[in-house]
Image (cartoon, rainbow, N blue to C red):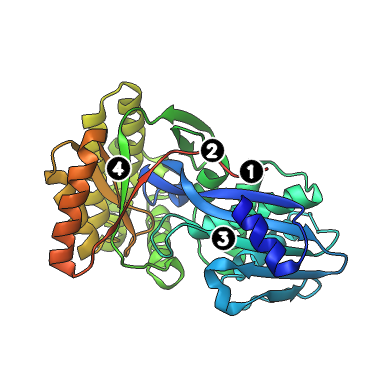
Amino acid sequence: MEKISFSFEKIFNKTPDVCCFAPGRVNLIGEHTDYNGGHVFPCAIHMGIYCAAGKRNDNKLCLYSENFSDEGIIEFDLADPNLRGCWADYPLSVIKALSAFGYDLPGGADMVFHGDLPDGAGLSSSAALEVVTAVTLRELYSVPITNQEAAIIGQFAENRFIGVNCGIMDQFASAMGKKDSAVLLDSDTLAFEYAPVGNAAVVIVNSGVKHSLASSAYNQRRRECESACSDLRVPTLCSLVPEEFEERKHMIGDEICLRRAMHAVYENRRAKDAVDALKKGDLPLFGSLMNESHISLRDYYEVSCEELDYLAEEAWKQPGVYGARMTGGGFGGCTVNLMQPDAVMSFTRTIQTGYEKRFGIIPEVYIVRASDGAGRTE
């Protein structure tokens, strides 16, 4: 908090009125189910995006990111807020979304951002940026929104203005995280419950392959799922349990759409089964469901890549590792690994050595803590 406050003073020559933080997230299981009406099980992590902001007495929005310092201060006129095709489109889109929800700001703002999430790693830096913007503006101008509403506004901003047809999971986890817990979210109803992660270590390995949901096949996957829904005559794929799906899957006319639907339906079951296993303390079962999830994402949803497959498959061989899978949208990014705490050092050494030998780079490894959701840092 002191760092972001100091940065704001240096950039704008005044003290910020408010400082906030929104975490990134790692999804333990339940991938590509949120926009299919299913369950997800993410946790907010201790890394994320900080924001310091101050009111202005005009209608300007002045944005600066320490992560994109070469771009300097980016100014928008709130009366005519056109996107620029850069990082600043995310906070601006949140302001446009707030307006669409009936919350027009009474004035402009100076805002400085700093993130410690690795770019393109699939840990939801975009969602954290959206949520921290919404929460900061709430605190700055007393906008009457809850954290859950901030998540909805963030998703709306990304869908409507950024053009990524994402589900609610990333923004919800960033806004609604809870220390030492993950959150089981029914993305269809937004009903949720927390479950403690327990004594297991959550370790993220960054493949170094950057993904971009906007330029990837993400939106195509969603269209394929919508096509399967149309064939099955259901509102969402995850409204079907696996037994119902098996009885009706012959109705899907396209083989690719069938595979996408199979992943969504069975992944939804895996997410619920995994949380039940965690509540019972059955970490080996939780881990085996993570492994099944990766295989399904690789073979049926086809959003993995050679590097992610290597990291998952090598993790499965390591002693003390309960389970491993790709996490996030796919096409690069990270794996999430659940393991015994005393296995972390050996796991890290083995994975980094093997990956460097195979791909020529040493992957970054993050031992993450489940954290609280977005809010003020002062």
For the residue labelled by badge 3, is the local secondary structure a helix, a strand or a loop? strand
Nearest to the observer: residue 34 or residue 212: 212
| Residue 118 percent coordinates (x, y) | 42, 61
| Residue 219 percent coordinates (x, y) | 43, 65
| Residue 66 percent coordinates (x, y) | 57, 67
Q: Which residue is mark 4?
A: 266
For the residues labelled 4 and 2, say whether their Cβ atoms are less than 8 Å apart: no
Could you tell me the amino acid type at mark 3?
Answer: His
Q: Quadrant of the C terminus?
A: top right
For the residues labelled 2 and 1, say whether their Cβ atoms are less than 8 Å apart: yes
Nearest to the observer: residue 319 or residue 12: 12
| Residue 317 percent coordinates (x, y) | 11, 45
* CA distance separating discs 2 and 1: 9 Å
- First along the sequence among labels 4 and 3: 3
Q: Which residue is mark 3?
A: 114
Give the number of the mark in front: 2 or 3: 3
Could you tell me the amino acid type at mark 2?
Answer: Asp
Please say if 120 is above or below 123.
below
Could you tell me the amino acid type at mark 1?
Answer: Gly
- First along the sequence among labels 4 and 2: 4
Disc 1 crowd rating (10 Å Cα; few below 14, some 14-19, many 20+) is: many
Give the number of the mark in front: 4 or 3: 3
Q: Which residue is mark 2?
A: 372
For the residue labelled by badge 2, is the local secondary structure a helix, a strand or a loop? loop
Please say if 311 is above or below 246.
below
Q: Which residue is mark 1?
A: 375
**291 displayed left or right of 62:** left
Give the number of the mark in front: 3 or 1: 3
